[in-house]
Amino acid sequence: MKLMTPPELEAALRDIGARRYHRLHPFHELLHGGQCSKGQVQAWALNRYYYQATIPAKDASLIARCDDAATRREWRSRLVDHDGEREGEGGIARWLKLTDGLGLDRDYVMSLRGLLPATRFAVEAYVHFVREKTLLEAIASSLTELFSPQIISERIDGMLKSYKFVTAETLAYFSQRPPLAERDSRFALDYVKRHARTPGEQQQVLAALVFKCDVLWAMLDALYHAYVAPGQIPPGAFIPED
């Protein structure tokens, strides 16, 4: 292994996203192309809620391990983005407006009773990764946000065009997310380019992004298996009315 220059490291990270980011998953092709039933969209939103709701706990654990005040201050904004400054604000609240708009009972969504087992395992694996790996790897695992503005644009355009049960208000989470994701990914990318100083550390950074892509891909694999084909919904998981 040779030491990559910062631009070479960035190119390698972007190549991972181009090949492995979950916008390429068949479930997203169905979702964005208007080929999902309402029940399938509900299942996606319900399961993704657990990921959204767990992000602040993941970020808080990262902050707790960070010795640098400047990095802690920067990362703290992510907690506010998702939890809000007060009740009813922030990304989690906006995600619940999505599930409300799709006709899901809010208490049921928040109870997590309808989760797919694989969703729970994938999200918890991500939290454990951030808590147990090096700070450099934890920060690198957030770099899927480099690629999120494109998928968000596809999602808003495709879902508003394709589904009568979806409105712009329902999708408010996504309309507000791109500038935040761009800010966060810019900081994380600069951090890993400055702090991955050896070939080994650079490989850890690349592996961390691969792991995070795998987490997101696994969640969609589970959705596809349960709600598309072969349609085997695990015991206790959400069952769509349609």
Image: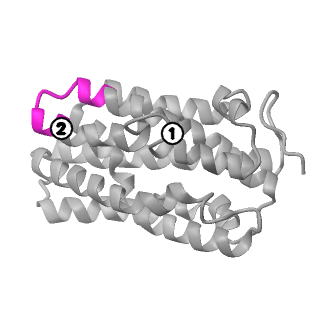
Residue 158 vs residue 212, the one in the foreground: 158
> Residue at horizontal 9%, vertical 46%?
197
Q: Residues within 10 Å of mark 1 (few under 14, many from 20)?
A: few
The coloring applied to the image is one colour
- Based on the picture, tell me whether residue 49 belongs to the magenta stretch: no
Q: Residue furthest right?
A: 242
> Residue at horizontal 28%, vertical 61%?
12
- Based on the picture, tell me whether residue 64 belongs to the magenta stretch: yes
> Residue at horizontal 72%, vertical 54%?
41
Residue 179 in the image: x percent, y percent? 34, 62
Residue 43 in the image: x percent, y percent? 73, 46
> Residue at horizontal 77%, vertical 68%?
164
- Marks 2 and 1, Cα distance to the nearest angstrom? 23 Å
Residue 139 vs residue 105, the one in the foreground: 105
Q: Which residue is mark 1?
A: 88
Q: Residues within 10 Å of mark 2 (few under 14, many from 20)?
A: few
Q: How many marks?
A: 2
> Can you see residue 1?
no
- Residue range in magenta is 61-72
> Can you see residue 150?
yes
Q: Is residue 133 above or below residue 212?
A: above
